[in-house]
Amino acid sequence: MKLPPFEYACPTTLSDAVALLASHDGEAKPLAGGQSLVPMLAFRVASPSLLVDLRKLAELRQIKIADDGVTLGAMVRWRDILDDARLRKAHPLLVAAVEHVAHYQIRNRGTVGGSIAHADPAAEMPGIVVTCEAKIAVVGKSGARVIDAANFFQGPLMTALKPDEIITEIRLPAWPAKRRFGFQEFARRRGDFALAAAMLFYDEEGGKAGNAHVGAIGVADRPLRLPAVEQVLNGNKIDEVTLANAEAAASASVDPHDDIHAGGAYRKALIGVMVERALKSAAA
Amino acid sequence: MTVPTTRRATNAFIGSPIERLEDLRFLTGRGQYTDDLTDERMLHAVILRSSVAHGRIRSIDTAAARARPGVHAVITAAHIGDIPTIPLRHDPLPSSMRYVQPIIAADKVRFVGEPIAVVVADSVALAEDALEAIAVDIEQLPAVVDRDAARKADVFLFEDTSSNVAGTITATLGDTDAAFKDAPYVRREHFKVQRHGAVPMEPRGLVADWDTAKQRVTVSGVCKVPFNNRRALAQMMKLPEASVRMLEYDVGGGFGARGEFYPEDFLIPFAAKVVGRPVKWVEDRRENLMSLSHARDAACDLEIACSRDGVILALRGHAFTDLGAYVRTNGATASRNISQIMSGPYRIPHVRMDVTMVVTNKTPSGTYRGPGRFESDFCRERLFDMVAADLGIDRIEFRRRNLIAEADMPYALAKVHVLDIVSECDSGDYQITLDRCLAEFNWAERSKLQGALIDGRYHGIAIGCYLEGGGTGPRENARLLIEADGKISVYVGSSSVGQGVETVFSQIAADALELPMERIKNVFHGSTDYVTEGFGSFSSRSIVMGGNAIVDAANRLRALIREGAAQRLGCAANQISFDNETVVGPNRAMLELKEFAGLAADGTHASNKRTYSYGAHAAYVAVDPKTGQVALIDYVAVEDVGRIVNPLTLHGQCVGAVVQGLGGALLEHFIYDENGQFLTGSFVDYLMPTASDFPSIRAVALEQKPSPLNPMGTKGAGEGGIIPVGGVVANAVAAALGSLGVQPHELPLTPPRVWQLIQDASSR
């Protein structure tokens, strides 16, 4: 359980960090909060030649709230989100999701950028950025670019990031004050990875749901949007019939694999239940 | 709540809620665990473990590893020569002898985690780097991954045995076949308890130091059975026992698994001899999960015969236990208990249990708190609830009708044939704990909620009874010494696994000598330096055996003091009395205890009869049928332990045991894939109960029926809390989901499993 040998650098500017990452033939890794990477090193399932520690890059630690939405610096920690009272209005779904992230100690260290770059299919933050259609700003040796969350996740622990690229910001679109939302997660124990979780929001127009966004984690090789469920919701009242239709549509949308914690059939049913319960709490 | 230890004493400490003497040390960071031991000459060992479940070793190339910086030695079977095997400490079935474990893999590997090589280096990190440079070429063989594959007998773990069956243990009472033949009601069910085990907070660790000049070895970090392990290591290293010292430090939990003789108990002392410097090895959690003995993993066909009015006529069954790759020190113990204890605290005149032990390519198993008892209680208590429902008899009434009565004591349990073990329940009124549990649980009120669907969850309650064997012999030894300041030092062959022996032995010694507790200066335990013969701590024996040995030593010490005082005061010994630290003769002549400094007495408690604690547990659960989640709303444990030495430590042990049982009932599972790969090598995948999972557990201990087998009347305690948990929780789940027709037959009751049971029941 000791880390394999590696070089370590702790740059003070983003451009130095990018240069360092680019200097190791794809064998360098950025170190954000270390809550996934360090255990992988301890198990020796990852052995980068260089760790580029991002902790001194103050510009990645900001939470910006503006009319066009919430921008989270990549090094914003879960604890920063929970401690920022503004976010409970500016993005309550984000806050609800972060409350489910792992355990107290991990929330003190883990970062939003690290979670997205790690791309665990059962992690909350990837689900949030996909559901909310966030933009992910990255910078690499060939410059800065912005990736749509929908295109960012490519499989378990696989993303659109190039080896020399660092996530700088996550841009969540503006959140109308009256928007309805729900987040429901089921894990074996509090703080465990989700067996399945649903996150959703919609805007009410004349007692009916519109602009529905429904996301799911833990049920595929990456976070999913569930357009079939959104279709069920848009233009409809959230009543017993809609709830039942949404539950069925959610289950029908996914085809999860078996693993040691749950079979695919269970997860398929579970995501329906999570969507139904998230909707109920949104409508309450 | 707690009693100051300075209180003037006359038999005042036994039974009092004395705070643990150990706690101040632990809470102020002064505990000393194996990994705390340091020495500037110390080197560090790590173990290369097989990543293959079953294979033939073609070659091991250590040259590159030996050339790595900071590496002092790389040890493989080739360096050791004759490879010793781990001796069987308990229940040594002749048929098991061919399945014992070599202390390092020489020609075959039989489970993922089996030691192949030891690297000794300047640091753990350097040693782990070197470990990656060892090239092992293994010809993979098909893995035998479960009991069915083991019995198919097309692949053998030990080719020369032509069988993967390491033996069958049979226990009988009466004539089962005759009883079944004429029975008006029979029911047969199949049950399974999953592989899980003890996961102590402190993983195993050892520091070994070889003294070249004196040709002797000191091993620190041992626990549980140091004297036994000294004997084993001395034989393996071809040393006289006197040349092997075993030192016990603080131990962060044992639960039956830690402290048995493992391969590392030889490999680390051997490595220390090779490098001529102290060598430390502390396993990491991944190693701990794959190399500390696993447990449970039993499947059982169980059949019951009853009269129509619910009197049990007979019980018979056949269990298959999956021991993993080898039969280790106490590998057969759980199987033996399943055979003998399946009848539990019930009067069943005819019993026959066969337990067949198979080997598979998994981590070897051993005892874990309540070995065999947790498994048998799950099977029996589940079956009882089904039978009671069949017969239309209330579940409590069914148990009440069949509990062993106080008038039946001593009550003989089934005889274990091949090991020739007989045992009998020593004392008890089993109705008392059942009644108390019902009252504490508020059963009458809660039974109104039985099966109710409230806010989307089904509510259910259940109760079950159990028996806890303890106080295992053959004997234990203690020595009490009067120090220069007149205080008493206690030396005892029992060991600490974190259960608070310093506290309870101080209470016992203080009361036996009628002294205040602070006059007990030290309790020396666990190391082989302290007494000439010790047996250690297992099978709920420390208080019964060690405690009564201390009482015996105290009586002898007092006799010696009387004699000495009589001589000095010129009177008869029977004219001497004691008043705290003062020895009083005729005419108020007085001597202080310190005037007897250096005086010591040895005491022994010997018994081949076990004590039997007993009790009843009740659980209240709510089950979410959409997710399969079982929430524990309330849990009550009531036990009678004969005599309570310390209600605080007992309460802590009982609640801890219940939580461990809930882990086994709901969460914990060692899982392998079809190739024998170990899939639960971290706490992400092996789910232990955490502090917030089970907030409501209540424990009540009684001392209604002391044991007639020892002077204090004590019985084994602390282990019992785990025994009925699986059965009681599963019965509560069955009760909650009764309207759906759900009948759990297998643990753990994970949300996916409970959900699947509901799907299966609704599609029937």
Image (tube, coloured by chain):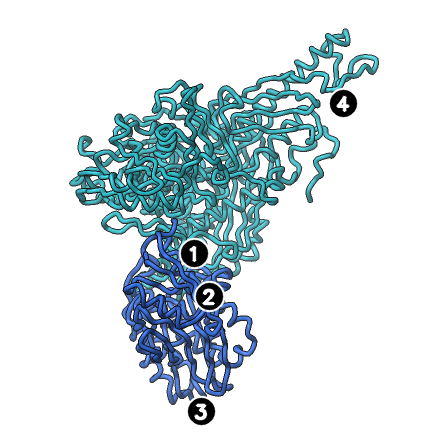
Cα distance between the residues tagged 1 and 4: 58 Å
Q: Can residue B423 be seen in this view?
A: yes
Say yes or no: labels 4 and 2 on the same chain: no
Q: Nearer the viewer, residue B12 or B707?
A: B12
Return the residue at label 3. A205
At mark 3, the secondary structure is strand
Cα distance between the residues tagged 3 and 1: 44 Å
Q: Mark 3 lies on which chain?
A: A
Q: The cyan chain is which one?
A: B
Say yes or no: labels 2 and 1 on the same chain: no
| The residue positioned farthest toward the bottom in the image shown | A206
Q: Where is residue B102 in the image (x, y as percent from the top left)?
A: 29, 31
Q: Which of B348 and A213 is in front in this view?
A: A213
Q: In this view, does B665 lie above or below A54?
A: above
Cα distance between the residues tagged 4 and 2: 68 Å
The amino acid pointed to by label 1 is Val
Q: Is residue B437 above or below residue B511?
A: below
Return the residue at label 4. B579
Q: Which chain is blue?
A: A
Return the residue at label 2. A55
Few, some or many residues within 10 Å of mark 2 (<14, 14–19, 20+): some
| The residue positioned farthest toward the left in the image shown | B154
Q: Position of residue A86 (x, y in %)?
A: 55, 79
Quadrant location of the C terminus of chain B?
Answer: bottom left
Say yes or no: labels 2 and 3 on the same chain: yes
The amino acid pointed to by label 4 is Asp
Say yes or no: labels 1 and 4 on the same chain: yes
Q: Residue B733 carries which label?
A: 1
Few, some or many residues within 10 Å of mark 3 (<14, 14–19, 20+): few
